[in-house]
Image (tube, rainbow, N blue to C red):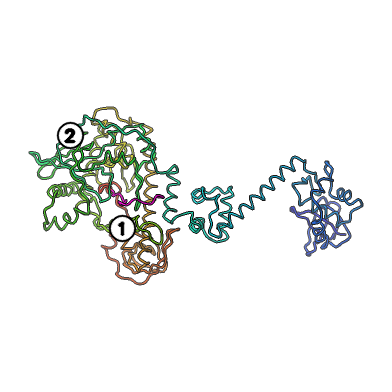
Amino acid sequence: MNLLFEEDGAFKTGTILTDNDASLQVETPHGKRLKLKSNHVLMRFAQPSAGELLQRAEAEAEGLDTEFLWEVCGDDEFAFIDFAREYFGHEPSPIESATVLLRLHAAPIYFHRKGRGRFRKAPAEILQAALAGLEKKKQQAAAIERMRDELLVGTLPEELRPLVRQLLYKPDRNRLETKALEAASAETGKSAARLFLDCGALASTHELHFDRFLFEYFPAGTGFPPVEAPAEPTDLPLAAVRAFSIDDAATTEIDDAFSITPTDAGWRVGIHIAAPGIGFGRESALDTIARERLSTVYMPGNKITMLPEDIVSRFTLGEGRDCPALSLYLEVSRDLIVTGHSSRIERVPVVANLRHHDIEPVFNETTLTEGGPDFPWKAELTLLWELATVLEAGRGKPSANQNQVDFNFSVDWSQTTADGPGRIEIGRRSRGSPLDKLVAELMIAANSTWGKALAEAGIPALYRAQTGGKVRMTTAAAPHEGLGVDCYAWSSSPLRRYVDLVNQWQLIAWVKGEAPAFPPKSPDLLAAMRDFELTYAAYAEFQRGMERYWCLRWLRQAGHPAMSARVLRESLVRLEAIPLIFKVPSMPTLPPGTRVQLAIDSTDLVDVEVRATYLETLAEASGEATEELDEAELLPEALDAASPPDVTTDTAPPAAA
């Protein structure tokens, strides 16, 4: 005797070996023996064989009309054999019974299961809803297939056009468009980004990486809402100085300038900081904008300013203007000892914006040692450099690592290469030049002096502190061991950092003798500090990522030439010509500092990866080289000294940027 039973949701057949009422020993057509409970048996039969029943029933079931079965079925619960008897009009054969069972089981929309071999027809309204849902799924499946096919031939489906950013950076896997994109990716083995590049949804790989950042941090775009222009105070005294700034060629947010006034005891050195905090205050519309952005975002060829351009232009220390400023005056003796200081809110005549590329050829270590040509501001720069040397010695810490090199990225957006808009040039500039030291030491002096003044006045501020090698932000004055100062409050870049703007408001209140914008234990001050730390770190990471991208563009422009590099550790190297770090698996184990020659095999602008092969060792490691490759970064507050240059070019970036 054979039987039909259900196991794990599937129908199976077998031959009875032993029947013990409550259980049976059964052998399947494949020779497997198993123990089966009697209540799992759906039907017993003698003919056909156990191996033939389901095979023949499946073929017969294809001929049954499910809709007709539903129409002739009663509303009460029923067993499949009873329904087969009614449907065929006679005692059904095992094959007929199994045929009906398989058809009922295969149509759960029409027939709801109520137990083993038992069913009940779906109510009409439920059936209609289920059929509508089924039809919708069919249409969705067809739409997915159509969109997938369009992507496979390099065409962007219209449905995907407004969703490109979302699909790339934060896809909703419940959307049909996402499913179509995933299906196309699975079939081609290409990422979503590569598919979109193929079909023209992205103009270039630069747009891919830049838009990822905008999607997360500037979802509403980089434009500014309309704001009322701040009213500058008209009663600020005019300082009796001739101030000058020192910046990179492309810097537009000029935060700091300097002046020297002879006195009977020596000189009065002025450190003048742009003062947007005089024009607008806390909880103003401009404060809301700055609080949301928290910092200017820098990247090769572009920047996203913290404040609107017209506000920056109004308060930047541009030459030929009397600019609102918060000034720190250092009283300096003839032997270059700082004997006192004072702070003022005033208008400062800025008579010159000096640029590195103009000054460094005539003001550098060689000209300071051997003498050089006369040029405007030579005497002032020399005096400030001598003062900076004394200040540096007083701190006991160098303001810049003489062995490190800064790389300047310049993008000419008027040119287009095979990889997209923009042609990159990367220049080298040794860190720690006399100009660097000059600006660095005066900025450190201003930030530490003002930080200490606020602490002594009991006015909270935002400080950078370093103890035990760990740099952190705090609202309490604390030592900065890396700089060798008692406290350090970022105050010298209020046009581009919200922390500096906050501290400037606190300083303005201190100078005026008024209540500070942020009182002691202000929760808003703590919140601003936390938000700034997270945002500033994210912006810095984005800048590093875009610099890496442009390094790869530089390599591609150069035709992937062989490059020299220095070993950092194990298989990790850094190219000497550009600031690109990557792994070279083929390189043997070499000491840090070893110079090697590499073949650049390929670069990937989507994943921003470079593949290279080790060719030869050029020079063994030396102590000097190892020191040069110290991976500890210069403290950002010391970099602030050099007024971190804008990396924009005079040529505007493409509209997408």
> Picture quarter containing residue 307?
top left
Which residue is situated farthest in the left direction here? 264
> Picture quarter containing residue 608?
bottom left
User: Toward the viewer: 14 or 281?
Assistant: 281
Judge whether residue 651 is colored magenta: yes
User: Toward the viewer: 230 or 615?
Assistant: 230
Quarter of the image with the N terminus is bottom right
Disc on the earlier residue, 1 or 2: 2
Residue bounds of the magenta highlight: 644-657
| 585 relative to 346, above or below | below
Instruction: Let me know if residue 485 appears in the view.
Output: yes
Instruction: Let me know if residue 530 appears in the view.
Output: no
Q: Residues within 10 Å of mark 1 (few under 14, many from 20)?
A: few
Which numbered marker is on residue 651? none
Name the mark nearer the viewer: 1 or 2.
Answer: 2
Q: Position of residue 95 (x, y in %)?
A: 85, 57
Q: Say which residue label 1 marks.
A: 630
Dot 2 falls on a residue whose secondary structure is loop
Which residue is situated farthest in the right direction here? 90
Of helix, strand and loop, which mostly describes the magenta segment? loop
Residue type (three-letter) at the residue carrying disc 2 = Leu
Judge whether residue 618 is colored magenta: no
Q: Position of residue 430 (x, y in %)?
A: 24, 57
Q: Say which residue label 2 marks.
A: 238
Residue type (three-letter) at the residue carrying disc 1 = Asp
How many labels sit on residues? 2
